[in-house]
Image (cartoon, rainbow, N blue to C red):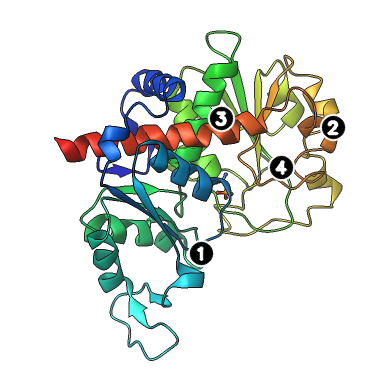
Amino acid sequence: MNKFLTVGDIGDLNAALKEAQEVKKNPFGWQHLGKNKTMLIVFFNSSLRTRLSTQKAAMNLGMNVIVLNVNGDSWKLETEMGVVMDGDKTEHLREAIPVMGSYCDIIGVRSFARFENRDWDYNETILQQFIQYSGKPVISLESATRHPCQAFADLITIEEYKTKKRPKVVLTWAPHPKALPQAVPNSFAEWMKAADVDFVFTAPEGYDLAPDIMEGLTPERDQMKAFKDADFIYAKNWSSYEQYGQILGDCHDPKWASWTVDMAHMDVTNNAKFMHCLPVRRNMIVTDEVIDSPNSIVIPEAANRVVSAQVVIKRMLEAIQK
Ligand code: CP
């Protein structure tokens, strides 16, 4: 494995889930793989879970870890090709990336969508430069369009908590005051379509995801209907793909506010577990009552971020050793 961006990069999902179970049972069992190897994790955007869980996963595997916060610790980086660098950017990614690659064995990169140009974001312009110029295996730690470590952790969590072979899993849009990227719902949908689950997508008109993600999905506009008999509710906000990066109205307007996941919604489910990738805005995405209920599994879901990252890093270390 030399890159981890989409569900296709992980291969057989059952094999990945089995490996996740083994890693969780014996987290320090593969320390020999990481001895004298360095993991570099680069952040263009803020993080709590991704930063800590990736670092922990690499340390569990015996690696040394370096963390770089591009917007705080390093020179300001130019990301566009062919520009005259007479502004505030001191260094170009074209030099910075191979330099970073020379200091490590694996690179993880967080670089969110900018919402300036949909093609620029959906071409994964920053992440692809890391893949092309670093000379090292690259993990997306949430890129412009995907968050695969999160989706893998979500799948591990569903596997752990499911009470039937093929559970009903609902991805629901929920209101938020700011425009958020589509990376988490894109990845969640992509992984759920590949998993052995009955997957339902519900969002208001105007919030469908990219056409390749929506392929095979029939969006349900009636959120209550979507929730009926669900085993897992996965809530998330995202901005519009069609009116790219826009929010389509005030989140306090009842038209949108009615999409907040509350007990009335949860009552029509099959005693569903509540999931969210975090960070979450309480009483906007989900009510206190739901997220504080015994059915909320957001904390074990976040804890599984260590497991998903560790499986991916382990596989990359194994590939390096061959
Ligand atoms: N879920 C997630 O990626 O959290 P952070 O943004 O805190 O890393």
Q: Which residue is drawn at 50% across and 70% down?
A: 71
Tag in front: 1 or 3: 1
Between the residue at mark 3 and the residue at mark 2, the CA separation in whole angstroms equals 30 Å
Q: Which badge, 1 or 3, comes first in the chain's sequence?
A: 1
Q: In this view, does 225 lie to the left or right of 146?
A: right
Name the residue tied to disc 4.
Answer: 174
**At numbered mark 3, what does the secondary structure look like: helix, strand or loop?**
loop
Name the residue tied to disc 3.
Answer: 218
**At numbered mark 4, what does the secondary structure look like: helix, strand or loop?**
loop
Amino acid under disc 3: Thr
Q: In which quarter of the image is the C terminus?
A: top left
**At numbered mark 1, what does the secondary structure look like: helix, strand or loop?**
loop
Tag in front: 2 or 4: 2
Q: In this view, does 303 lie above or below 3?
A: above
Could you say which is closer to the camera, residue 266 or residue 320? 320
Between the residue at mark 1 and the residue at mark 3, the CA separation in whole angstroms equals 28 Å
Amino acid under disc 1: Arg
Q: Which badge, 2 or 4, comes first in the chain's sequence?
A: 4
Between the residue at mark 3 and the residue at mark 4, the CA separation in whole angstroms equals 18 Å
Name the residue tied to disc 1.
Answer: 114
Between the residue at mark 1 and the residue at mark 2, the CA separation in whole angstroms equals 34 Å
Q: Residue at x 39, y 75 (%)?
A: 77
Asked if the residue at label 3 sits under 8 Å from ligand 1, the reply is no
Q: Quadrant of the N terminus?
A: top left
Q: Position of residue 140 (x, y in %)?
A: 40, 48
Name the residue tied to disc 2.
Answer: 289
Q: Which badge, 3 or 4, comes first in the chain's sequence?
A: 4
Amino acid under disc 4: Ala
Q: Position of residue 161 (x, y in %)?
A: 60, 17
Q: Is residue 271 left or right of residue 151?
A: right
Identify the residue at the far left of this view.
Answer: 322
Q: Which badge, 3 or 2, comes first in the chain's sequence?
A: 3
